[in-house]
Amino acid sequence: MSKAVITCALTGVLTDPSQHPVPVTPEQMAKEAHAACSAGASVVHVHFRQQAPGRGHLPTWDPAVARDIAGAIRDRCPGIIINQSTGIVGGDIDGPVHCLRAIRPEIAACNAGSLNYLKVRSDGSWAWPPMLFDNPVEKVAAFLRAMAETGARPEFECFDTGIVRCVEMYARAGLVTGHLDYNFVMGVESGMPSDPALLPILARQLVAGSSWQVTAIGRASIWPLHRRAAELGAHLRTGLEDTFYLPDGTKATSNGALVDALAGIARETGRDIASPAEARAILGLASDLRPPPA
């Protein structure tokens, strides 16, 4: 099988750095990206956090912050591929678009459909107020236009099977052209479960020639899912955005430890790990670093 491209999701949206070892500042993000790259990651998925003291658990769409973080990562990890999050609730997408223009990532996550984002505690109460992660077609289309403008490859994040099937319709409707990348998000309580048996079914829904990976959210249940994805020829992703737990149940203290564990699983299935340069060739991206934004 082809070499596996590993993505490391460095920090996430709201994880509190006072409680978990997630990076926030440009220096921390660059250090964690370097650890992940040294362990086998060739792509880093980034969210941007507020930089004021005590505010690092809150997201920001400040283009200056995005530029500082992307610059620090690129300086520390030459050749690494940046994948920018664009996830936002509501119809105002100016913030993510400004960040796309500021850092010109090679890849940008594109949430491909809406989801009731829910979780229930053991006592039957809501873990947070029920919310709709809204991604109607007009919002997806606007993001795809911005990604085309900035040269970012859309990576379609799919939280449910119907959303997976929508991606092919976006292509038929002319909203996106060229190679398609899918990301099956599994483990969100109101989305697809972390069930390895689902993967062959989902893979059959893809446009021929597409690439895919799995974002596995959770604890022990995610590692069999990663193994099955590797066996089926998918690319791979892990990181402190997705889990804090290693296969043996111990808590990870860095992204590098998670990537090292995932790379080990991939090798056990007969997969070699792609370097950043090899990942660029596999994914059809530019063979050198992105030029600095104007």
Image (cartoon, rainbow, N blue to C red):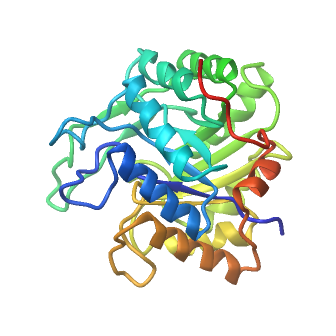
The reply to whether residue 187 is in sight is no
> For residue 55, what is the image quadrant?
top left
> For residue 231, what is the image quadrant?
bottom right
**Residue 255 % position (x, y):** 44, 64
In which quadrant of the rendered image does the N terminus lie? Answer: bottom right
Of 202 and 88, which appears nearest the observer? 88
**Residue 76 % position (x, y):** 52, 52
Left or right, 97 with respect to 60, comes to right
In which quadrant of the rendered image does the C terminus lie? Answer: top right
195 to 152, vertically: above or below: below
256 to 153, vertically: above or below: below
Numbered circles on residues, count: 0
**Residue 285 % position (x, y):** 77, 41
Which residue corresponds to the image point at 33% horizontal and 30% vertical from the top-left? 60
4 to 283, vertically: above or below: below
Of 97 and 104, which appears nearest the observer? 104
**Residue 293 % position (x, y):** 59, 23
